[in-house]
Amino acid sequence: MPLKIIMIKIAIIGSGNVAFHLIRAFSASKETEIIQVFARKKQVVESLIATNKITSDLTELKPADLYIISVSDDAISEVSEALNFSERLVVHTSGTKPLDFLSNKNRRGVFYPLQTFSKNKEVNFKEIPICIEVENSEDYTLLEKVAHSISDKVFRFDSEKRKALHVSAVFVSNFVNHMYRIGSEICEQNNIPFEILKPLITEVADKINYLHPKEAQTGPAKRGDKQIINTHLDFLKDNPVNQEIYELLSKAIMNKNL
Amino acid sequence: MPLKIIMIKIAIIGSGNVAFHLIRAFSASKETEIIQVFARKKQVVESLIATNKITSDLTELKPADLYIISVSDDAISEVSEALNFSERLVVHTSGTKPLDFLSNKNRRGVFYPLQTFSKNKEVNFKEIPICIEVENSEDYTLLEKVAHSISDKVFRFDSEKRKALHVSAVFVSNFVNHMYRIGSEICEQNNIPFEILKPLITEVADKINYLHPKEAQTGPAKRGDKQIINTHLDFLKDNPVNQEIYELLSKAIMNKNL
């Protein structure tokens, strides 16, 4: 008689970018089973999971070992209050919201995957750090098992530490991407293919595997080259926001030299 | 009788990060020969080239097909004036200084490799875009040949276009690295290993190979999540510079949503 492996039953509440990639990852794992997905618009997740497993009614959620609320941060509290069951394990996926942002009628936890997710870009979940936190230590084993079922990198962080990590992540991810956007727009306005900047972008990201960012810094501000900085500020005069960003960041880099 | 290949004779003037990597790349190429390096401090380049090819006296420079001035932008003019020869091909490596920043006693050009160079981090020059510009079109063939001897990506850009490219490069390279530095410092202050952010950093850089930075943007500012933004600004209250950077960049991203 074949050994029956008992899979951990997971319900995902949400259909945003994080939910989308979690559904994919847990569906691919042999240790976990997505038993249900709550999505206001069913069609968003229809490509990922059988239609009979999708509900748009929170009160229809079935018994599961773990409920992952992956909705916008503002909605976490409301959604967790709206669940019509108690004493079950319910986690959110926010980097910044504390654990106690969840309704205390259920056993609470956090399951924060540290990555930038876009629906039309695949990611390798094995490499993605997952930060977990639980209210009751007896829930740790299960949540850790779930995290390890999709990732090799699992960390136990409390809410304060997770918030610090999230702030860092905004700088190295969201703000970095905005720098790419400004660079691409300047290229477009000057008929320069953005492609030309890609080897530079790759190298800058790769460099910090070998050098501390402090040692890796180069450029006019690092050299204190005010002539070049002023030439660039003049070049940016038609875009006051970009000019202000250039000036503030150059000053910040120069002040680090002092 | 073996065919004698005539190599292009290059003299490098300077010993900074760019000069350092150019010396390496041209020494490795079969089409070019570094006949001399000018370095104020000879020991900086002694690991790269035979001692008898290093001079610290500009008036000792020997006849070469090409002189590459790779010094700080402020010193380019002075150094090019100090050369005691004329009618030879002399280029600088600056992204921002125009071609006519060089003394007009020689034939002028620009040889700008678009990359961030640190002495203790190797680079693959084949992938590095080189932007070239010449005053006299008859010098183009030689300069292009020299560029192609070390890189697969050679572009002919005039000074205005090169400046636009350099400004973009400052955003996607120098400012991005400063974001990494802020992220790493927040991690250090909160006993979080910076390693944990590296998969995110790699993914953000990789993502723009698949998505335009506009499409790739994620995070609290992109979602217009003011609660999280305020929580993060409060978290940063002890570092007014980082707080100001966070606020300015969040506003810039939010304004792009409008």
Image (cartoon, coloured by chain):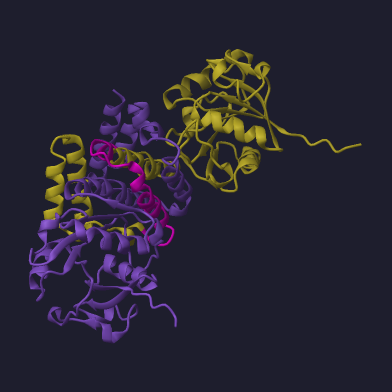
Chain colours: A yellow, B purple
Indicate left or right for A195 with B95 as reference. Answer: right
Most distant residue in the bottom direction: B52
Tell me, yes or no, if residue B239 can be seen here: no
The boundaries of the magenta stretch are A185-212
| Image position, residue A246 (x, y; %) | 20, 44
Horizontal and vertical percent position of residue B15: 24, 72
In this rendering, position of residue A238 left or right of residue A109: left
Q: Nearer the viewer, residue A140 or A179?
A: A179
The location of residue B153, given as percent across then percent down, is: 36, 54
Left or right, residue B61 beside residue A72:
left
In the image, residue A123 sits, relative to residue A79, either above or below, namely below
* Residue at screen point 55% across, 36% down: A135
Tell whether position A73 is magenta: no
Q: Quadrant of the N terminus of chain A?
A: top right
Residue B197 spot, x, y in % from top left:
45, 48
Q: Judge whether residue B180 can be spotted in this image.
A: yes
Horizontal relation, residue B141 to residue B121: left or right: left
Q: Is residue A190 magenta?
A: yes
Looking at the rendered structure, the number of numbered marks drawn on it comes to 0
Q: Quadrant of residue B143?
A: bottom left
Q: Residue furthest right?
A: A1
Q: Which residue sits at x=31%, y=71%?
A: B23
**Which quadrant holds residue A24?**
top right
Compare residues A18 and B86 and report the one nearer the observer: B86
- Residue B123's place in the image compared with B196, above or below, is below
Q: Quadrant of the C terminus of chain A?
A: bottom left
Please name whichever residue, B156 or B121, is drawn nearer the observer in this view of the structure. B156
